[in-house]
Image (spheres, rainbow, N blue to C red):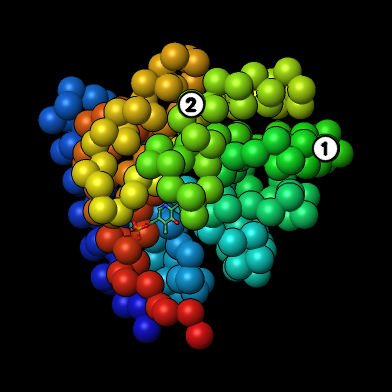
Amino acid sequence: MIDPQTVTSNLAEVRDEIARAARDNERDPADVALIAVSKTIPAEGIVPAIAAGQRRFGENYVQEARAKWPALRAQHPDVELHLIGPLQSNKAREAVELFDVIHTLDRPSLAAALAKEIARASRHPTLLVQVNTGEEPQKGGVAPGAVDAFLADCAGTHGLMVSGLMCIPPPEDPPSAHFGLLAAIARRHALPILSMGMSADYPAAIQAGATHVRVGSAIFGARQPKA
Ligand SMILES: *Cc1c(COP(=O)(O)O)cnc(C)c1O
């Protein structure tokens, strides 16, 4: 059971912490967008966050988002939905229809599938390239050394506009070096969006220049294990 009051007070704390981290680094708190990561959280846990003014939400699975969000969005059309989990090419059509921002573009076959569905739907979600800054074999994302070529391929071969980068540092590493690397690659390509920082490390990400932090458990509590 999720207690609505806990969600409301957690959300207020995270907002305060974001504002503090921004000011500590001489940044405007308005330049750091909070994405509330609501994966595994049922609608009754999400409603109190919407009531408290939260409008950006992140989901990991197309299927789960499709089940949960159309009803909520019918009531709150200004909600912005972010796909932050891995995307299979055969789900590209649904992802383009459902999401406003896709954070996990990371391979040519997915770029091709997204380009096709974007043309078909005449709807272009904001696209971010996921970078595997820790070069972990089990994790999605483009290796740091391959990002330049991949961005060129997205634009040149697929006609896709990419607006930024996203990373998930290896849990055992101090995150700051990964955030710094992502920021440097984005700067080199003049990409405005940097999606980095989760519950455990979003202040460090803000220090490194994050424009979007993805915070789940600090707002909604520990996730329910999957049945
Ligand atoms: C689950 C998830 C988050 C949120 O993680 P918390 O530690 O609960 O804040 C952020 N980003 C991605 C990609 C995730 O999968």
64 vs 26: above or below: below
Residue 100 image offset from top left, x and y in percent: 61, 43
| Mark 2, residue position | 145
Residue drawn 63% across the image and 48% down it: 99
For badge 2, the amino acid type reads: Gly
181 vs 104: above or below: above
For badge 1, the amino acid type reads: Lys
Residue 137 image offset from top left, x and y in percent: 48, 50
Residue drawn 62% across the image and 26% down it: 150
Badge nearest the viewer, 1 or 2: 2
Mark 1 crowd level (few <14, some 14–19, many ≥20, 10 Å Cα):
some
| Mark 1, residue position | 116
* Quadrant the N terminus occupies: bottom left
Name the quadrant containing residue 85.
bottom right
137 vs 195: above or below: below
Counting every numbered tag in the picture gives 2
Label drawn at residue 94 = none
Residue drawn 69% across the image and 23% down it: 153
Quick check: 184 left or right of 155? left
Q: Report how far apart the C-alphas of labels 1 and 2 lie in the structure.
A: 27 Å
Residue 125 image offset from top left, x and y in percent: 65, 37
Residue 114 showing in the rendered view: no
